[in-house]
Image: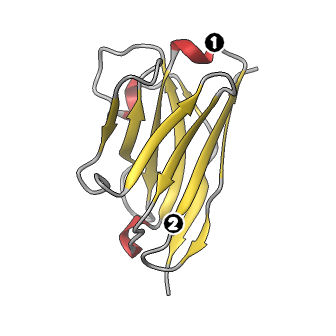
Amino acid sequence: EVQLQAFGGGLVQPGGSLRLSCAASGFTFDDYAIGWFRQAPGKEREGVSCISSNGGSTYYADSVKGRFTISRDNAKNTVYLQMNGLKPEDTAVYFCAAAISGSGSWYNPYEYDYWGQGTQVTVSS
C-alpha cells in the first residue's frame, strides 16, 4: 500500500520556523521526485517546492525562495521542508506528493502520482 504521510505542522508566530516531514512507503522512493504543495481556504492548490529523485535538483515557488529549503534522505524514505521566516500568507494545509516522471512541470499537481494527507501550518501572532 502506497503511503505518504506529512507531519510537522503547527501554529507559529510570524518570523518563526517549522520543519515539515514527508514519510513514504509502498513504492520505490528513490525513483520519485517529491513535491510540496499547499492550499489555503478558498484558494487553489499551489506548488511550493520539489526535489528530484536523487536530490540533485530543487525547485521553489518565488514566494518561498530564500526562506524554505527542501531536502531528502533516501535511506529513510523521507523528504523535509525547512520553513524559516514564516509569514501569515504561508498559512495553509501542506501536502507532499510523489511523481515518477521528471519531464513535467514540478508545480503542476496533475504531474504527481501519489498524494499524502495534509498537515496544517498556521502563522499568526
Looking at the rendered structure, the number of numbered marks drawn on it comes to 2
- In the image, taking residue 83 as reference, residue 105 lies left or right, namely left
Mark 1 is surrounded, within 10 Å at the Cα level, by few (under 14), some (14 to 19) or many (20 or more) other residues, namely: few
- Residue at 45% from the left image edge and 26% from the top image edge: 112
- Residue at 63% from the left image edge and 12% from the top image edge: 28
Q: Who is closer to the viewer here, 4 or 29?
A: 29
Q: Who is closer to the viewer here, 80 or 99?
A: 80
Q: Earlier in the sequence, mark 2 or mark 1?
A: 2
- In the image, taking residue 66 as reference, residue 50 lies left or right, namely right
Please, what is the three-letter code of the amino acid marked with disc 1?
Answer: Thr
Mark 2 is surrounded, within 10 Å at the Cα level, by few (under 14), some (14 to 19) or many (20 or more) other residues, namely: some
Q: Which mark is residue 14?
A: none
Q: Who is closer to the viewer here, 123 or 110?
A: 123
- Residue at 34% from the left image edge and 26% from the top image edge: 57
Q: CA distance from mark 2 to mark 1?
A: 30 Å
The x, y position of residue 87, in whole percent, is 38, 72
Question: Against 67, is 47 above or below?
Answer: above
Q: Quadrant of residue 2?
A: top right
State which mark lies toward you, 2 or 1: 2
Q: Secondary structure at mark 1?
A: loop
Q: Which residue is mark 2?
A: 17
The x, y position of residue 47, in whole percent, is 36, 43
Please, what is the three-letter code of the amino acid marked with disc 2?
Answer: Ser
Q: Residue furthest bottom?
A: 125
Question: Against 85, is 65 above or below?
Answer: above
